[in-house]
Image: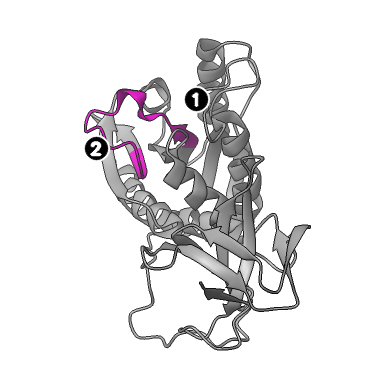
């Protein structure tokens, strides 16, 4: 399949921002999606551009997409909840042209919303019909993805905690016609030696005050053993973790917000499926 893709907005017309910055996030996502789509056998045309105002940027997206001869156009955006009609600004959604008769657009939009929401662990708001310029003016089936909300703290945490592998696979699988389930239906829980990010989850029983059970426990800038070490805890010190945790590199990672406002991650223990006496952090 030939895919035209664009990260919305530009440096001079940057879109929404609060806890997340739409322009920075959609450009980062597109940069990861392009090689992932190519690896899956697709031809990809990047229609992102840096026109100085919103109208010019949108028109250039459409021009590049229409000249590409692509089979489908995908626009990547991040949502702003200030005008959310149901007053619940959280989750993933997709948009297609409200008058489209394209089964490809309808099917991809539905699956992309579900897959990205599942990867993030947030609400799936589903596929919707709209009259957005890039959906109306492109000459091929088109899908606009709103990854999550820039002004919702839970969405920000979910986005920062989810691996690029999971986020790119969500889109790749949707374009292939697949829905990725939240959890494998019959597979056993991975053993402690499992490597690679497995996504994040919200559990109201997980958060709270933990006491360090290790002589030294590193704090990292992302939930991975390859994350940069930014601080450490010594035995007996305590830390208050959020309700969200991430399974990656064979460990369960807790997260908290530092005084700087940045998310920090500590390995609670090896991923065995239950608390262990040997865990690095134990609930106080």
Mark 2 burial class by Cα count in 10 Å: few <14, some 14-19, many 20+:
few
Crowd rating for badge 1 (residues with CA inside 10 Å; few <14, some 14–19, many 20+)? some
Residue placed at 33% from the left, 80% from the top? 185
Q: Which one is nearer the viewer's eye here, 113 or 1?
A: 113
Q: Is residue 211 above or below residue 85?
A: below
Magenta region = 75-94
**Does the image show residue 4?**
yes
Q: Nearer the viewer, residue 15 or 171?
A: 15
Left or right: 197 as drawn, with respect to 134: right
Residue 222 vs 258, above or below: the answer is below
Q: Secondary structure at mark 1?
A: loop
Residue sitting at 52 percent across and 14 percent down?
A: 54
Q: Is 22 drawn above or below residue 2 in the view shown?
A: above
Question: Which numbered disc, 1 or 2, marks the residue that appears first in the sequence?
Answer: 1
Residue receiving disc 2: 101
Determine the image quadrant of residue 60: top right
Q: Which residue is mark 1?
A: 16
The correct choice, above or below, for 88 with respect to 250 in the image is above
């Amino acid at each position: 399949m030939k895919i035209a893709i664009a990260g919305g907005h530009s440096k001079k017309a940057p879109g929404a921002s609060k806890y997340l910055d739409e322009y920075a996030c959609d450009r980062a996502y597109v940069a990861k999606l392009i090689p992932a789509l190519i690896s899956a056998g697709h031809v990809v045309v990047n229609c992102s551009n840096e026109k100085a105002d919103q109208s010019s940027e949108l028109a250039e997206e459409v021009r590049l997409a229409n000249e590409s001869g692509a089979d489908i156009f995908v626009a990547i955006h991040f949502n702003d909840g200030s005008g959310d009609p149901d007053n619940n600004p959280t989750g993933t959604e997709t948009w297609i042209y409200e008058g489209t008769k394209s089964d490809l657009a309808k099917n991809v939009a539905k699956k992309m919303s579900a897959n990205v929401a599942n990867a993030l662990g947030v609400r799936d708001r589903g596929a919707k019909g709209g009259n957005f310029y890039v959906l109306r003016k492109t000459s091929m089936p088109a899908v606009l993805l709103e990854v999550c909300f820039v002004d919702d703290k839970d969405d920000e945490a979910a986005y920062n905690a989810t691996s690029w592998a999971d986020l790119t696979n969500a889109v790749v699988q949707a374009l292939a016609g697949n829905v990725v389930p939240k959890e494998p239906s019959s597979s056993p829980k991975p053993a402690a030696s499992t490597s690679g990010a497995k996504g994040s989850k919200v559990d109201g029983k997980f958060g709270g005050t933990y006491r360090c059970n290790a002589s030294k426990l590193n704090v990292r800038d992302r939930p991975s053993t390859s994350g940069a070490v930014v601080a450490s805890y010594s035995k007996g010190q305590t830390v208050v973790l959020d309700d969200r945790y991430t399974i990656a590199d064979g460990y369960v990672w807790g997260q908290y917000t530092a005084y700087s406002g940045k998310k920090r991650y500590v390995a609670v223990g090896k991923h065995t499926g239950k608390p262990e006496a040997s865990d690095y952090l134990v609930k106080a």
